Amino acid sequence: MKETQILKTYDVERDIEDIKKAAEILKNGGIAAIPTETVYGLAADAFNPDAVEKIFKAKGRPSDNPLIVHISQFSQIYSIARSVPESVKRLAEKFWPGPLTIILPKKAAVPSVTSGGLDTVAVRMPKNPIARKIIELSCPLAAPSANISGFPSPTAFEHVKADMYGRADAICDGGKCGIGVESTVITLAEETPVLLRPGGITLNQLKSVLGEVRVADAVLNPMGEGEKAQSPGMKYKHYAPKARITVCKGGFEFFKNAAADFDSVLCFEGEEKFFPDKITVTFGKKDDPLTQTERLFESLRELDERGAENALARCPSAEDLGLAVCNRLFRAAGFRFLREKKGIIAGLTGPTGAGKGYVSEYLRELGCYICDTDKIYRELTGKNSPFLNVLSRNFGQDIIDGEGNLSRSLLAHRAFKSKDSQEKLNKLTHPEILRISFERCRNALESGADAAVIDAPLLFESGGDKKCDVVISVICPEEIRLKRIMERDGITEERARERMSAQHGDEFYTDKSDYVVRSYSPYNICEELSDFQKKYLSGE
C-alpha cells in the first residue's frame, strides 16, 4: 500500500506550506487528491503521461475515458488547445473560474492518455482557490473525481480518504465541496455546441452566451454500442453505490406502492415518514435541485453505510439544474427504471423551415431519445458502407470511387432524372433507414427512455408513420419559414420559395397527425406539447 500524506488545505494563506507540499508532489510526477468547488479531484501533471497513468491505476478507470485538464489562468489554455475560438473567451468571461469544462481540439503536447485517445481535450478553471493555488505552484493538472471508478464521486474529505488512502501520494483535506456534482461539459469542437454532461452551469446559462446548444442523447440515455465517449461520465456506469438502484419514473402514489418490493428508498425531504419499515435516505427537497446536487452523492454513499441492497429512487425533474441530478442518478442506476407510463415511439415530421429542430431539442431536454433519419442516411452512404453495394448495383458501379466513397452528385443525377428512378432510390433507402431507426428506438426504450422520437422529414412518404405510436407534425406560417430557410441555408428568397413550393401544404401534415405544433418561435413549443408531455412522459 502506498504511503499517503494528509495535508490541510482549508485556507490559502494559513495552509500555504501544505499547499506547497501538494504542488511539489504533483510537479515530481506524483498524484494527489485536491478539493474543488464541484467534487474532489485526483490530480496529476497533465503533460506527464507516466503521472497520468497513475490516476487510471489508482481509480481502476477505463483508459478510453478522457480526463479534464485544470488550469489556474486563461493564458494556459493556449498550451493545451490547438484553437481557441471567440466563443471560449465569452464563456470564460462569464463562467470561469467555475464549474464549466470546455472541449476543444488538442495540441500534440497533450498526451493521448490524458485525452482518452481523442484528438480533443477538456479544459476547465476551478473556482476553488486551493485548487487554483496548487495549479499555479505546479502545472496544469489532469484530474477526474477522486473515487474508485464507477462509485459515487467524493464531496467530502472523508469520502476521499475512504477511497484513496493508500492509492494516492497525498490527500488534501479541504472540507466539503459546495456544488456537489461534477462540472458541466460542453464541446465546441463541433459545428453546433453540444452539452455532453450537465452540471452547475445550466443549459439555459450556456444558451444565454452561445445561442443554440444541443443536448447529447447520452445525457439522459445510455450511449449507443460502439459510440466513443467524448467526455468523462458518458460511457460507463458511473456514480453507483454497491446497492442496486432503480429510478421510479412516476407520481408519488405510484412510488409508494412500488416501494413494497424494495428494502430501501431514496426520496425527497419530508417523504421519509411514509416508509417507516424501509432504510430511508433523502437527497434534497423535491422542488430544489440545488439541495439535490449537494446531497446526491453523499446519499448514495449513505445507502451503502446503512446496508441497503435494493433501493427505489425518486426521479427528480430534469428542468434547469435538475438535468445534472437526473444525469448522475440515471447512471448510478445503470439506466434501470420502473415506469408508471409506457414508453412510446413518436414520429416527428414537417416541411423544411417549420421548426422541427426546435421541437426535437425540446423533447431531447425532456429525456426523449432522438433518432435523426438524415444522420442515418449519411451513415448508410458513408465511406465503405455495405449499403453502397446495394446502390451501385442499381445505379452503376461508377458511383463508388476506388477508395469506397460515394459520388453523391452522380447518384443524385441518376436517381432524380425521372420519377421512376427516384422511386427506385426511395424503395432502397426508406426501408433500411426505418429498420435502423426503429431498432435504435426500441433499444432506447428498453434502456429507460420515456419516449423515442424518429425525426423524419419523409415520415409519411416512407410509411414510417404507420409503425409509430403517435405522430407529431410541425407547421409554421410561410413568412417565418421563408426567413428561417434563407438564414439557415444562406440562399436567396427566390430559391427558398422554390423549395417551399415543392413541398406539401400544412393540411398534408395536420390531417395525418396526432399532435400538431405551430412553431412560431422556440418559446411556444412547451405549451404546444403540454398534452403530449402529460400523457406520455413520466413525472408528476
Image (cartoon, grey):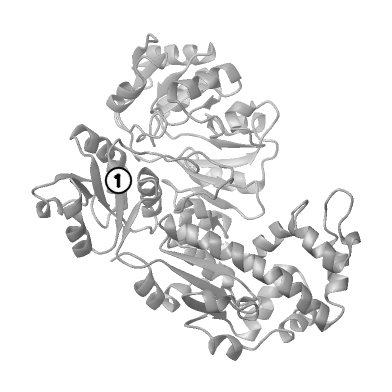
> Dividing the image into 4 quarters, which one contains the N terminus?
top left
At horizontal 48% and vertical 21% (from top left) the residue drawn is 57
Q: Is residue 106 above or below residue 266?
A: above
Please state if 501 lies on the left or on the right of 217 as rendered: right
Which amino acid does the dot numbered 1 rest on?
A: Ile
- Seen as rendered, the residue at the extreme right is 398
- Tell me the residue that label 1 is attached to: 245
> Dividing the image into 4 quarters, which one contains the C terminus?
bottom left
The answer to whether residue 521 is seen in the rendering is no
- Residue 500 horizontal/vertical position (percent): 71, 83
Q: Nearer the viewer, residue 260 or 472?
A: 260
- Residue 233 horizontal/vertical position (percent): 47, 40
Q: Residues within 10 Å of mark 1 (few under 14, many from 20)?
A: many
- Residue 101 horizontal/vertical position (percent): 52, 40
Q: Is residue 348 above or below residue 513?
A: above
Q: Nearer the viewer, residue 83 or 410?
A: 410
Q: Secondary structure at mark 1?
A: strand
The answer to whether residue 277 is seen in the rendering is yes
Could you tell me how many numbered marks the image carries?
A: 1
Q: Is residue 381 above or below residue 414?
A: above
Q: Is residue 346 above or below residue 193?
A: below
At horizontal 82% and vertical 77% (from top left) the residue drawn is 421
Please state if 402 lies on the left or on the right of 342 as rendered: right
At horizontal 73% and vertical 70% (from top left) the residue drawn is 428
- Residue 431 horizontal/vertical position (percent): 65, 70
Occupied quadrant, residue 352: bottom right
Occupied quadrant, residue 17: top left
